[in-house]
Image (cartoon, rainbow, N blue to C red):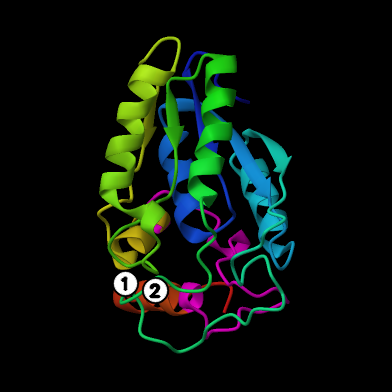
Amino acid sequence: MRNTTKNEAVVLLSGGLDSSTVLFIARRKFRCHCLIFDYGQRHSRELKSAKKIAACADVDYKTVKIFFPWKGSSLIDKNKKIPYNKKIGKEIPLTYVPGRNTIFLSYALSFAETIGAKKIFIGANAVDFSGYPDCRPQYYKNFNKLLSVGTKSGDIKIETPLLYKTKKEIVELAFRLKVPLELTWSCYSGGKKPCGKCDACVLRAKGFTSAGRKDPIV
């Protein structure tokens, strides 16, 4: 049964390791409402995972369908190849979707204002990540400044509890919180099993290996 005495929070849920862990962090103190974005990504596997995780966490969710007609990323343009086995973190990869987090957070802000939520949770990470510019600490610092002057109440805040954690620390936290890791999906490709070669798979594997844990989806 959902706790109706907690304050409201909006959680951006992709179905991956990071966002799922953030949901389980947020639900300890807040009544969570998840936003799951169908933005034309290469496969629907992560959408299915996100919905299952929301159900497992006993929180409600809304699926928001948006469209990037100009493409600009190998995640939404099947004519562009997903890069494999390149050094991570040196340059912005082809999997970066221009403006994606800004758009997602804008939807989350609108939803938060509508339901009276004061917190927006996102699983951004700036340690073991692919180098996306909208995962940098300065981005969220400035976005929160924007929210302080661009909202009715001025007190809505974006929370990034994983921002400075390594993938190892995130995996360890996920196990402590009993996140249903067998339901999560991080791979940029669809299918029954992760490809094991894309940035998301490489970083996820690094986290589980460093934590001395077995990834239940591999």
Q: Which residue is mark 2?
A: 208
Badge 2 element? helix
Disc 2 marks a residue whose amino acid type is: Phe
Res. 43 image quadrant: bottom right
Residue 92 on the magenta span = no
Residue at image coords 36%, 28%: 146
Report the front residue among 21 and 129.
Answer: 129
Left or right side of 100 for 143: left
Report the front residue among 148 and 70.
Answer: 70
Q: Position of residue 23 (x, y in %)?
A: 49, 42
Residues marked 2 and 1 touching at CB (< 8 Å): yes
Report the front residue among 195 and 6.
Answer: 195
Checking the image for residue 211, the label placed there is 1
Q: Work out which quarter of the rendered image holds the N terminus and state it.
A: top right
Res. 22 image quadrant: top left
Q: Residue farthest to the top?
A: 153
**Boundaries of the magenta span:** 175-201
Q: Position of residue 211 (x, y in %)?
A: 31, 72
